[in-house]
Amino acid sequence: MSGRRPDARCPLRPEEPCTLCQLDVTGPQDCPLVYLVMTDDELRAGTHRSRLDFANRGPAVGPAEPPANGHAQRVER
Ligand code: SF4
């Protein structure tokens, strides 16, 4: 056992870790955006659907290398 805590996942973006994108937060546990979403029935249901979609779909897979023409590609989700 390493003793290192696992990285917290953002409850709003299930495929991503918490990046502390909100001001003065230490993680999802004190994130005001998570609080607002999770205390609203419709937003919480939408987040739940998003998590189910992610669980069924798996992580997004992008191109391993940029295209030969060097132009960025739009990734459809
Ligand atoms: S600060 Fe909140 S909204 Fe931002 S990544 Fe972390 S949990 Fe998600």
Image (cartoon, rainbow, N blue to C red):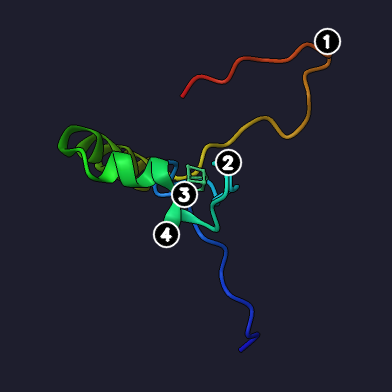
How far across and how far down the image is residue 39, in percent? 22, 44
Q: Along the polypeptide, which appears first: circle 4 or circle 1?
A: 4
Task: Please name the amino acid that badge 2 sits on.
Answer: Cys
Depth check, mark 2 against mark 3: the one in front is: 2
> Which of marks 3 and 1 precedes in the sequence?
3
| Tag 3 secondary structure | loop
Read off the residue under disc 4: 29
Q: Is the residue at mark 2 in contact range of ligand 1, meaning its CB lies under 8 Å from it? A: yes
Q: Dot 2: what SS?
A: loop
Q: Work out whether mark 2 precedes mark 3 in sequence or the reverse, and give the earlier one.
A: 3
Residue at x-position 25% and y-position 34%: 43
Q: Cα distance, mark 4 to mark 1?
A: 44 Å
Crowd around label 4: few <14 · some 14–19 · many ≥20 (10 Å): few
Work out how far the residue at label 1 is from the one at label 3, CA to CA, in angstroms.
Answer: 34 Å
- Numbered circle sitting on residue 69: 1
Which residue is nearer to you in this view: 71 or 42? 42
The earlier-in-sequence mark between 2 and 1 is: 2
How far is mark 3 from mark 4, CA to CA?
A: 10 Å
CA separation in Å, label 2 and label 1: 33 Å
Could you tell me which residue is drawn at 57 percent across and 20 percent down? 75
